[in-house]
Amino acid sequence: MTSSSWPRSLLGIPQGTIRATVLIETITAAFEMEEILYELRDHAAGLNAGRWDYIFSLIKNFRTRGPRFVLPDRGQVTMTQPFMRAYTEQLVRACHKRGAMAIGGMAAAVPNRKDPDANANALEKVRADKTREANDGFDGSWVAHPDLVPICRQVFDGVLGTKPNQLDRLREDVTPDDRALIDVAATTGTITEQGIRNNIEVGIRYIESWLRGNGAVAIHNLMEDAATAEISRSQLWQWIYARAITDHGEIISHEWVEELLDEEFARLERFDGDRFEDARDIFEEVTLATEFPSFLTLPAYARYLTEAREKATDEELAAA
């Protein structure tokens, strides 16, 4: 009996009442989208394009496979790059072939009520992202902030009209292509020094915020979470490993990244009670180590959750 069948039987509710939407956020899952839907069958609501974890997964799985798997600056890895187009279009096709909903990903841009220009820029980026998804056949999407719900709704209503979904768009024009999913070499763009610096800054600032209990944080008008921080640090690890070359012909080395890390760390705006020193220790461990840690959270858990548990009293542990 499946995890959804057991409570259904216990509560006496109709089959299909409990359904799940599966995040396709690893490259390996992208090769089995139809299999996932088949296994869930009556319990499947749809699939969601978890874009940021997906990019991290691709880097992680092919990090040592040579230059053809090296991506440009994170900001240049957009949803219009060929391997990302293959991912989203094949997801829509797989879903609609089996009567499941295809849910778009979360645009990282977040509104800024204090800066009209930045706010207008964020709204335009989200509008373009949701327009692409709606035109591709997605049935709905995610947003990173409540202020973005109206623009997302407007875009999808404009394409769907009075229809509740686009299940009738089977996307038979899309050919399932495993090679296209990993055709990273077709990605356009460059690696820049600013891209390296941005990865360092975002990685450290996110980890610092995470250590204070925040799962997501807005940095430079983009919503950063564990997945985007993973992209930042894994790109740096891979660039060092591959001795990637920037647009100015500089080889990315361990020593150079350390120098840039010192500079970026010195620029951080400090405050009472911050965790930047701890964040830097973790960031260096997951970025500059010879072996690639599977997830940046693992050494953080090992270091700080264990430490907190050892310091906690019996009463505190019992209360937890």
Image (cartoon, grey):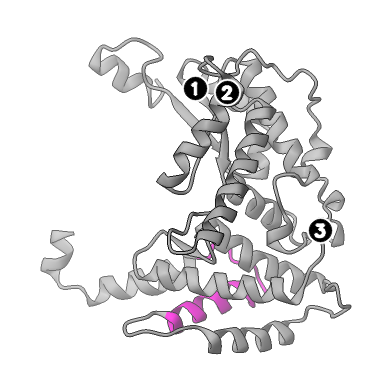
Report if residue 102 is visible in the image: no
Residue situated furthest right in the rendering: 249
- Disc ID at residue 142: none
Which image quarter is the N terminus in? Answer: top left
Label 1 environment density (alpha carbons within 10 Å; few <14, some 14–19, many ≥20): many
Label at residue 65:
3
Which quadrant of the figure has residue 199?
Answer: bottom right
Q: CA distance from mark 1 to mark 2?
A: 6 Å
Q: Left or right of 133: which side holds 165? A: left
Q: Which residue is mark 2?
A: 37
79 left or right of 222 in image: right
Question: What residue lies at 37% left-to-right and 63% top-to-bottom?
Answer: 214
Q: Closest to the observer: 72 or 20?
A: 72
Disc with the residue nearer the chain's start (3 vs 2): 2
Q: Left or right: where does residue 72 sit relative to residue 288?
A: right
Can you say whether 287 is above or below 168 in the image? below
- What kind of residue is marked 3? Arg
The span picked out in magenta is: 276-296
| Count of numbered tags | 3
Circle 3 residues within 10 Å: few <14, some 14–19, many ≥20: few
Q: Residue at x 67, y 44 (%)?
A: 27
Q: Residues under labels 3 and 2: Cα distance?
A: 30 Å
- Is mark 1 in CB contact (under 8 Å) with mark 2? yes
**Residue drawn at x 73%, y 64% as measured from the top left:** 73
Would residue 293 be counted in the magenta stretch?
Answer: yes
Kind of residue sitting beneath label 1? Ala
x%, y% of residue 29?
A: 63, 38
Q: Check disc 2 and give the amino acid type.
A: Leu
The disc, 1 or 2, on the residue closer to the chain's N-terminal end is 2
Q: In this figure, which residue is indicated by the disc labeled 1?
A: 44
